[in-house]
Image (cartoon, rainbow, N blue to C red):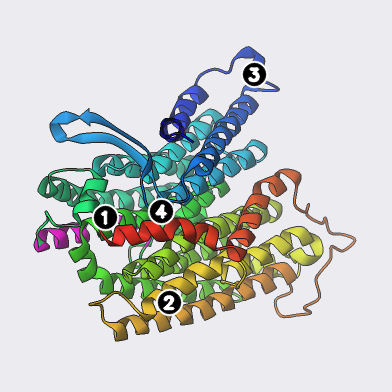
Amino acid sequence: MSHTALQYLLAAIVVLPLAGAVAALLPAPPGLKGKSPEQAVLRHGVTVTGAVLALSIALAAGFDHGSPARMQATTDISWIPALNIRIHLGVDGVSLPLLVLTALLTFLCALYSYFKMPSGPSPKAFVALLLVLESGTLATFAVLDLMLFFLAFEMVLIPMYFLIARWGGEGRERAAWRFILYTLLGSVVMLLGLLLVGIKGGTFDMVALATDNGSKLSHSTQLIAALAIGIGLAVKAPMWPLHSWLPDAHTAAPTVGSVLLAGVLLKMGTYGFVRIVLPIAPDGAHTFAPYLAAFAAVGIIYGSLVCLSLARKGAKGDLKRLIAYSSVGHMGFVLLGIATLTPTGLNGALFANIAHGLITGLLFFLVGAVKDRYGTSDLDALSGRTGAALYGKAPRLGGLLAFGAVASLGLPGLAGFWGEMLAMFGAFRPAEGLSRPAFLTFMALAGLGTLLTAAYMLVVVRRVCMGGDGGSTRPQTAGAGENAPTDVLSYEFAAWTPLVALTVLAGLWPAALLGLTDPAVQQLLRGGN
């Protein structure tokens, strides 16, 4: 495909959701209303996100897979000449998979919402916010100017705040405020770091700065910039101990909000580390890498222990909250891979990013379906004698939940395995100048985290899918006086099947993703040369 065609494709991918958001707020044309205006606007959301997904697949198909380290589909137009800020877009092997993942998850969320709209205000506002959120996330992965990156990074905050505060569940307003306050405070610090880099480096162009590889920035400037930018990115990642906004946000958010928050928004932080901090401030990245790895290792253990605590009998643990805390552990593996500063670790981090988006997105869809059927996501209620016992009452739903759990614990042959393994391999032999004994300790802690993850996920499967809490392990079936819940519905099957298929495909054919990321990672570590 020609360069011009790829240019237009990438520009359309970023702009189309914004145009769709504006259109969603306008009255529906009389011929397109269908049964009601609400149905028309929800169908509009499916159409726009479907078109964006089709464009992103076309972009991936036209991408030159022989040169994934080269920025492709680039657009570079002067925007604010006085500040030397440009509209600079482009994709390489690092950003392309995240772009397609974002388009896929947003489309599946729009499709799911068409049939199962969360209770709350007007669907018009819901669809418009969903599309603004998609545009901001796609732009974050596509822009190559530090100021545009910051604007796109912040663009997602307001729509996610309203999705939680207006369409969320119990405690939604408090959760929404915590989400926006934490991320805004982190972003203020990050902005100072970005401005420092742009002023001292003489440009805000991320490609030019990466090519310079910090040569125009003094050692102290790199240290301050890496710390400031890293704090803002770590809040969004979320890195322990800056994660405390996450469980409340996930627990209160509607199902599609949780899917997008876990599947896409968390990736913006880790992507920023790879795209900005490592190539632009290499001295700062090298100095802070051991601390980043230490926080990542603690986060892996901490997240797993909290999940074990929530999963035990009598803890009144919430299944959505448990999956949210599992994200702290899983994203810890991503941060550990980044902290190794090695191609192996970075490839593992990028692979784990995609795997986490697929698997945790699926898990939040499934937990939402369980909550819809039983009116609760409380583990004690779901695992009691009259609880879910999904294997007997809704076997397909139970089977999918078990699949999501074993994928999340890193079963070989599924997507979750490769990223965690490569991150630990990277920690086994970190970059030159980093303390190998320290990183071997972090690797051991990460290995312990995988065992703890297996423990709590298997406890969840036993309690929710079998029920009975320690009684007979035979699957419970609905008695004569019980109303068996509906099993997987057709629209749920349509929304979940792509995630299941891609989880299996990525597990069996990791080279498809690693072949894209590895050349780009090698180039980033060399400073873009």
Asked whether 407 falls inside the magenta stretch, the response is no
Cα distance in 3D space between marks 3 and 1? 52 Å
Is any part of residue 171 visible from this angle? no
Q: Residue 446 in the image: state x and y as whole percent.
A: 43, 78
The amino acid pointed to by label 2 is Phe
Specify which label sits upstream in the sequence, 2 or 3. Answer: 3
132 relative position to 454: left or right: left
Q: Which residue is mark 4?
A: 94
- What secondary structure is marked by label 1? loop
Q: Which residue is mark 1?
A: 529
Q: Which residue is mark 2?
A: 425
In what quadrant of the picture does the C terminus appear? bottom left
Cα distance in 3D space between marks 1 and 2? 25 Å
- Label 1 packing within 10 angstroms: few (<14), some (14-19), many (20+): few
* Residue 472 vs residue 385, the one in the foreground: 472
The amino acid pointed to by label 3 is Leu
Looking at the rendered image, the disc whose residue lies closer to the viewer, 3 or 1, is: 1
- Label 4 packing within 10 angstroms: few (<14), some (14-19), many (20+): many
- What secondary structure is marked by label 2? helix
Q: Residue 364 in the image: state x and y as whole percent.
A: 58, 55
Q: Check the image and name the residue furthest to the right.
A: 480
Q: Residue 257 in the image: state x and y as whole percent.
A: 51, 47
* Residue 52 vs residue 475, the one in the foreground: 52
Specify which label sits upstream in the sequence, 4 or 3. Answer: 3
- Label 2 packing within 10 angstroms: few (<14), some (14-19), many (20+): some
